[in-house]
Each structure stands twice: as C-alpha cells, then as structure tokens.
Image: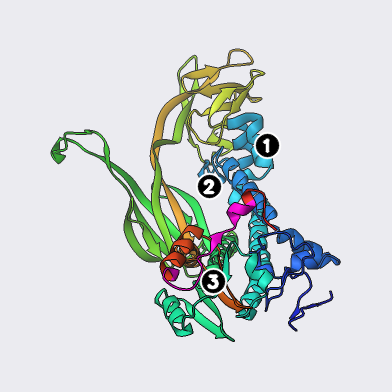
Amino acid sequence: MKEVKCECGHVNPHGTIFCESCGKSFDKNDKEILLDMRYEGSARRSQTYKKTFIDSIWNFFSSVKVGVWLIVITLLASSLGTLFPQELYIPQNIPPEDFYEQEYGFAGKLYYQLGFYDLYGSWWYMILIAFIAISLVICSLDRVVPLYKALQKQGVKRNSNFLKRQRLFAEKRIETSQSEEQLINLLKKKHYRVHVKEGNILAEKGRFSRWGPYVNHIGLIIFLIGAMLRFFPGMYIDDALWLRDGETKVIPGTNGKYYLENKRFIKEVYDEKDNFTVGMGMAKNYQTDAILYERVDEVVPGKKPELKKIKEQKIRVNHPLKFNGYALYQLNYRLDELYKMTFQLVEKKTNKRFGEVVINLENPQSIYDLGNGYKVELMSYFPNFYFDEEGNPATKNRLPENPAFIFKMYSPVVPDGEVSFVGIQTNVEPFGENNYKMSFQNLDTRNATGLTVRLDRTIGIIIAGGIIFMIGVIQGMYWNHRRIWIQKSEGKIMVAAHTNKNWYGLKREIVTMFEGTILPIPVDQQEKVSKGGVN
C-alpha cells in the first residue's frame, strides 16, 4: 500500500482521511462542512488491507456487527440452555440421553442431541466464547493503534480547511490585541494542557477518556479468558455428589484422591420447644454428618482404597466443608428413600415358607439361592414402574420410587420355574395359577444427602476482568476528550473545537472562558448541516 505524503511534508499511511499533522483533507470533495473525526481520520487495517486470507479473517472479526451477532447468538444459546435442567441437576443414576427423552419427549431428545444438556461445557459454546474474545482483540487493535498514533502526531498548527470543517467553529478579523499569556491562563484555569507554536494554540484535556472503550475490551477479554479456563481440568468444578446414610464415595473432580462418608443426614423442624409460633413444622436445619478421607495408596482400578481420615464436620446450608480449594455445600436431600425389600417364597396351598429374598434396590442380584432345590431368579427389575403405550411394564427412571419385579421361582415341585409379576400391592401370575408366590415381608428405607462440589480457581481472573471493565466504563462515561484550536491567519483569528461527546458541556465551557476576550464564540455548525449544509 502506497503512503500518502501531505504538502506539509508529513507521510501518512494509506487510507488516512486527513493529514495526521496539519489536518489537510485528502478527500477531493471538500464541500462537506463537517469532517469525519472518528479515529482522527487515521487508516484502519481492515479498511486498507483486503488481499490475503489473513486480511479476510482480520476484516471479518474487526466488524462491530460480527461482534454483536456473536454476542446475540451466545445469549440466545445461553437462554435455550435454561429451558430444561442441566446435566448437573438431573438424577445421577439415569443416563442423560434417557432422562431428557423420558421427561420431555422429542424436545428433550433434541435438547440432548444438540448438546444443550451440558451447555457451558460443550465444545461449540467454548468456540463461541473464543470467537467473541478474538473479535474483541481484533476490533480493539484495528482501532486503538491508529488512533494512538494519530493523537500522538497531531500538530498545533492545523490546515484552515480542517478548522472550518469542525463542528464548533468561528472566525473574525482582529481589531484589538490581547496577550497570548492571558489566553493561555484562561485555558489552564479549566485544566487544559496548552501547546503553543508560532502564535497558534492547541488546548487539550481528557485524552485518557478516549481509551475507556478499549479498557472495557481488555476487561472483557480477561473475563472471557477466565470463563474459558473453566473448561480446563482442575480449574473449575461444579458437580453433584449424592450419598446415602452410611455410604462412602469418591469426591468428583479430585481424581480419586479424596473420599467422603455420610454418617447420617438430619432434617430438623421447628416445634413448640423452639418458641417459634410462625411457620411451625418448617425446616430449621439440613445437616450432613460427614467424614473427609484422603487416599494414601495408588489409584488402581478394582482395588479397595486405603483411606486416611482428614477431618470430620457437620455440613449445613451456608456452612460448607472446605479443603484444598474445594467446597462441599449442602444442596438437596431425599428422605426415606426405598433401600431394601424383603420377600419370602411361600407355597400357596400350605402357606409353608422356604426362605427370604432380600433385594437391594440399588444393586439387586440376579439369582437368590434358598437351598434344597429352591431358588428365585430376578428376570426383570423396574425401579419406577409404569405400563408403556403398548401395555408392557417399563420404568420411568432408575430411582426406586415404585419398584416392581418379574420373578421366576424354582422348586422341586416345579423345576422349570413359575413366573410372577410383583409390585407394591400387586401380584400377577401371567401364565396361569402358580403353586408358589413371592410374599412381601419388609421394607427398609434410608435418607440421602445431595451435596454440591465446588472448585473455582478462575474467580480471581473473572473478578479482575470485571473491575477493569468497570474502570473503562467510568473512564469513558464521566470524562470526555476536548480540544480547542486558536489560530491567527491573514489578520483573522479562527477558533475551532471538538469533543468525542457532550457537545453542550463544551459549548458552555467555551462561552464561560471566551466572554470578554477578543476570541469569537464558536457556533455549532451541525445546525447548518441539518438545515441543508453550507459551502
């Protein structure tokens, strides 16, 4: 790309609208009364380089429209992710592909297939976040670099055409003289930095506010980096851990190093002894009596771990168990969950009993040998039984809320076995009357506690990004970049002014400073443009 040399001698990058030094416009159409001051008329890479594949990528991501659409798509995806619960909040003993289809039908199946069930951990959501970060970086570099160079190179003496095409401009012939020092003092009282060259004045303040949007971008980029780091192992964990009373399990996300035992779960409610009249019977405490263990041997599949007790604590709401950056929060519970069901094999005619069958509803056996030629085979198990559309027994999920069984009972009398369908208050003999039946005897229940496992090593990065973003908001919102040019030429004095925002404030400030001086009060030429323009 060929550089553009101005008649003042300054060499400008290709695509520059007006000279960075003197302000002379390179636009052949000088009839436009107002000059485009965005990025100080400097050349942006996306507007000048359009030949190579890298240029195409750069130009694509440098577009503000592309950045906005990426944000809109990400927000839309995030909202769709709230239609159904995320994988973390569904029953852990049901495969996600089965749960969503069973609970929500075709919509749930589509929701799972598109990856919305684990939205914030999906690869395509991570790519969207990465694209937003890339867009922010390229948008910022495409604008901030040329803007910085142009502001650094701006001259005190500017081309008369540059001054006349500013929004605030006025000129008049000099009839009386006023010392240059007096004008400089007026400007300095308003905290302007004053530059003087050959009798020409450039007064400037608030330049740092021009970097506010780019500080915003830096904060957002840091924030997005923190969000993306959550996808890396060991940086962020938000998982669920369900434990029944007396159960010990490995804590998710610890690579098998830490285990937790639930001694018991307790739910306490307000009663008369509490002198609590409002809300009698309401829960006052959810508590898991827990023991934290550390595995001291090497992790070998199938080997029973050797555990060392680390600490014991009562986990309550807002009182988590914390260790090594992890935190275990009390989140949920299930009371009186069905645990074991006991049946007896009974001869119907004599009511004689031939042994007990104790079924662990979480992990049932397939064969129960009662001895002396008697045994029971568990052919099918339906933890949450219902009849499907075809009238066949099926299960809604893996939670043992309405268990039902298909037994095959073997005996010396009937060595080929008899089939019986047994559920709660249900005993069906589908192939005719049997000689034996499975008689319900007992039901054991237990409580279960639901804990959330949290680990977040990205929170510091995210907070830092948020703070930097707010600094940029304040920087760009409460200050503005103001410039005033005062130039004498051929017996005339010209005054022009520009600001990146708050024109009303700049006008009032100029009136306050220039009243009673030889300087003319600039008029707002935007009004002339709105009425049809002036040559």
Given the current orientation, which residue lies at the most extreme bottom position?
198
On the question of residue 410 being in view, the answer is: no
Up-down relation of residue 518 to residue 108 (above or below)? below
In three-dimensional space, the C-alpha distance between marks 2 and 3, rounded to whole angstroms, equals: 56 Å
Up-down relation of residue 325 to residue 338 (above or below)? below
Find disc 1 in the rendering and name its residue: 110
Q: Nearer the viewer, mark 1 or mark 3?
A: 3
- Could you tell whether 429 is left or right of 323 in the image? right
Would you call the spot at circle 1 few (<14 residues within 10 Å), some (14-19), or many (20 or more)?
Answer: some
Q: Nearer the viewer, mark 2 or mark 3?
A: 3
Amino acid under label 1? Leu
Identify the residue at horizontal 42%, vertical 63% (top origin).
Answer: 293
Percent position of residue 440, x then y:
45, 25
- Find out whether the residues at labels 2 and 1 contact each other: C-beta distance under 8 Å: no
Find disc 3 in the rendering and name its residue: 483
Q: Quadrant of the C terminus?
A: bottom right
Numbered range of the magenta stretch:
514-529
- Could you tell whether 466 is left or right of 56 in the image? left
Report helix, strand or loop for mark 2: helix
Find disc 2 in the rendering and name its residue: 88
Up-down relation of residue 259 to residue 246 (above or below)? below
254 in magenta:
no
Would you call the spot at circle 3 few (<14 residues within 10 Å), some (14-19), or many (20 or more)?
Answer: many
- Find out whether the residues at labels 1 and 3 contact each other: C-beta distance under 8 Å: no
> Which mark sits nearer the N-terminus, 1 or 3?
1
Of 233 and 443, nearer the camera is 233
